[in-house]
Structures are given as C-alpha cells and as structure tokens.
Amino acid sequence: GENVEQHPSTLSVQEGDSAVIKCTYSDSASNYFPWYKQELGKRPQLIIDIRSNVGEKKDQRIAVTLNKTAKHFSLHITETQPEDSAVYFCAASIHYGGSQGNLIFGKGTKLSVKP
Amino acid sequence: DGGITQSPKYLFRKEGQNVTLSCEQNLNHDAMYWYRQDPGQGLRLIYYSQIVNDFQKGDIAEGYSVSREKKESFPLTVTSAQKNPTAFYLCASSGASGSYEQYFGPGTRLTVT
C-alpha cells in the first residue's frame, strides 16, 4: 500500500525566512496531495492541495510543488510569521472518477517561527 | 467550527470498559473517516465509510468498531480489546462536489487508566 515519508520532523526558522517541508510517496497511482496545518490541541485544517495533473500551485505565501517522476512533493512557506508555527502534515491519496479516496499521512513536521 | 462535530472533547474510562465516541456532520458528505493521532505518529486511519450502511477497515482497525446507519453520523466504539486506547481521535468527512478535501472535527481526547 501507499507509504508517505515526511522530512524534517522539526524545523526552526527566523521570522521572515522561508520554510520548506518535503514528502515522498510510494504509490505512483496517487493523484491527490493535500497539506494540513494543525495548531496545538486543534483540528487539522487544509492549507493547500495539488492534483497530479499540476506541477505547482501557489496561494499567497504558500506554495506546493509536485514531481511525479521522483514521487515527491514539497510545501514552501515564504516570509514566515510566528502564527505559522504549527505541525504540518502532508498526505497522498488515489481518486478514481468522483470517488473519495483514503488519505495516507506523513508523520508531521513541527515548524517553529522565532520572532 | 460548524459542519462536523465530535463529543465529548475529553473522555476518561477505566480499563476494560467499552466507550463510544460521537461524530456528526451536517455537510451532506457521503464519506466519513476515523483517525487516531499519537505524538510523532501522524494520523492513522481506523475505519472509513464511503456510503450509508457500508464501512471498511483502515490500517489499525483491531479493537475498534463502527456503524453508519445515518449519513450524518459515524460513531466509533473503542472496545476493551484495544490494547492501547489512550489517544486523540479525529473524525473527518468528505464529498463536496468537485473536492477531495477532508474536513476534520475538533477531536476527542480519550484517556484510559
């Protein structure tokens, strides 16, 4: 079955710097790759996602890139702010037609942004 | 925070007791999921249901049971057979038209002593 590896497990940056989190997946049939942000004690919330027919997607300070050949995808956060501090999870899933696939999650990256 | 709810937020039980966690959604989503979250382990899938009256085991189903009698509800029972039940449990749903996004509930933190 699908396996998702996420690195690093912890990441500390200075406010204003960029942060990059990387994930690899094993099943070449995976076609949907979301990123979730989870603040302490709260529910995970989707921040950005990408489908396999797209190589890059941006939303303000957040971007995701996908390399299907290498089976890896990355989250890029620019101009980091203290409120970006949280645990970030990547995930992968396979969707056929309109069906809802099951997400396989990475183990998470704890991002700390120092003021 | 509306849409998908879980209750209670905190739950304490003695070892050997079964306990049922509630999950309700008013998003009209067909699919619902239960995850377990442990520190440093990410989210692991326990059970999922793509449609009413049907559900499938996920990666760590042993010691758990579910039912899906209504579209809005997907309760999870943690049985006494679950060897290490203390964890944070998250319910999610998906099925919005054209979207694969899973929406999560606020979670239930279960402590078994």
Image (spheres, rainbow, N blue to C red):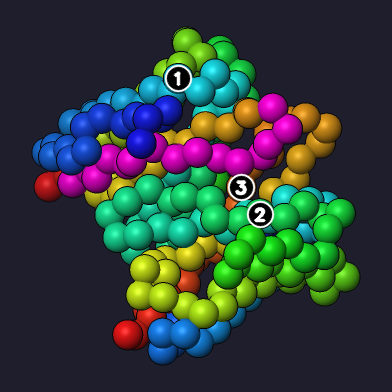
Determine whether A69 is above or below B56 in the image: below
For image coordinates 83% across by 32% down, the residue present is A97
* Badge nearest the viewer, 1 or 3: 1
Looking at the picture, do discs 3 and 2 lie on one chain? Answer: yes
Q: Nearer the viewer, residue B110 or B14?
A: B110
What subunit carries mark 3? Answer: A
User: Could you tell me residue A16's position as x and y percent?
Assistant: 47, 85
Q: Residues within 10 Å of mark 3 (few under 14, many from 20)?
A: many
Q: The residue under label 1 is which amino acid type? A: Asn
Q: Is residue B103 magenta?
A: yes
C-alpha span from label 1 to label 3: 21 Å
Q: Which residue is mark 3?
A: A103
Q: The residue under label 2 is which amino acid type? A: Asp
Q: Residues within 10 Å of mark 1 (few under 14, many from 20)?
A: few
Q: Is residue A48 magenta?
A: no
* Badge nearest the viewer, 3 or 2: 2
Q: Which residue is mark 1?
A: B26
C-alpha span from label 3 to label 2: 12 Å
- The quarter of the image holding the N terminus of chain B is top left
For image coordinates 55% across by 40% down, the residue present is B102
Point out the stretch of residues depicted in magenta.
Answer: B97-111
What subunit carries mark 2? Answer: A
Label 1 sits on a secondary structure element that is: loop
Q: Which residue is mark 2?
A: A49
Q: The residue under label 3 is which amino acid type? A: Leu
What subunit carries mark 1? Answer: B
User: Could you tell me residue A28's position as x and y percent?
Assistant: 83, 59
Q: Is residue B87 left or right of residue B112?
A: right
Q: Quadrant of residue A19?
A: bottom right
Counting residues from the N terminus, which is met first, the one under dot 3 or under dot 2?
2
Contact, CB < 8 Å: mark 2 with mark 1? no
Q: Nearer the viewer, residue B68 or A112?
A: A112
